[in-house]
Image: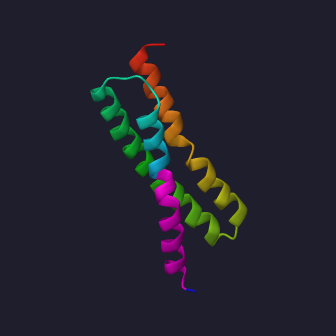
Amino acid sequence: MDDAIAWIIIVGFYAPLHYLLPLLVVFITGRESERARRDLMRRALIDSTLSMLVAFAIVITLTRLGHMLPAMLMLLVSMLYPFLRIWLHRREITGS
């Protein structure tokens, strides 16, 4: 299989998890106002996009060097970054 097709398939399965899980957490949890929740959702989308772009740049580099396990671990760890940012933004909003 062509490398480009394999990466498209990987992104196709990875992106929905990377975007939808943080948005779901923001939507379901928290007691912020509607405006604060909307801001958190916008920030979560931005954080998800940036972390996904950085993660895939690192992952593609690692796989070309033949380090598949660290590359897959990088994808897993990068999924946690938007949740960390949600937690930090919520602390800013609540002031605690």
In depth, the one of 81 and 24 nearer the eye is 24
Q: Give coordinates of residue 22: x percent, y percent.
A: 47, 42
The residue positioned 69% from the left and 58% from the top of the image is 70
Q: How many marks?
A: 0
Q: Is residue 32 left or right of residue 72?
A: left
Q: Is residue 28 left or right of residue 68?
A: left
The residue positioned 62% from the left and 52% from the top of the image is 76
Is residue 32 placed above or below 22 in the rendered structure? above
Color style of the picture: rainbow
Is residue 56 placed above or below 66 in the rendered structure? above
- Residue furthest to the left in view is 35
Q: Is residue 42 left or right of residue 95?
A: left
Q: Give coordinates of residue 3: x percent, y percent.
A: 54, 80
The residue positioned 37% from the left and 33% from the top of the image is 40
In depth, the one of 86 and 57 nearer the eye is 86
Magenta stretch bounds:
2-18
Screen quadrant of the N terminus: bottom right
> Does residue 12 belong to the magenta stretch?
yes
The residue positioned 56% from the left and 58% from the top of the image is 58
Q: Main secondary structure of the magenta part?
A: helix
- Residue furthest to the front in view is 28
Q: Is residue 80 left or right of residue 45?
A: right
Is residue 70 placed above or below 64 in the rendered structure? above
- Residue furthest to the bottom in view is 1
Is residue 29 placed above or below 11 in the rendered structure? above
Residue 53 is drawn in which quadrant?
Answer: bottom left
Q: Give coordinates of residue 84: x percent, y percent.
A: 53, 34
Q: Give coordinates of residue 69: x percent, y percent.
A: 72, 62
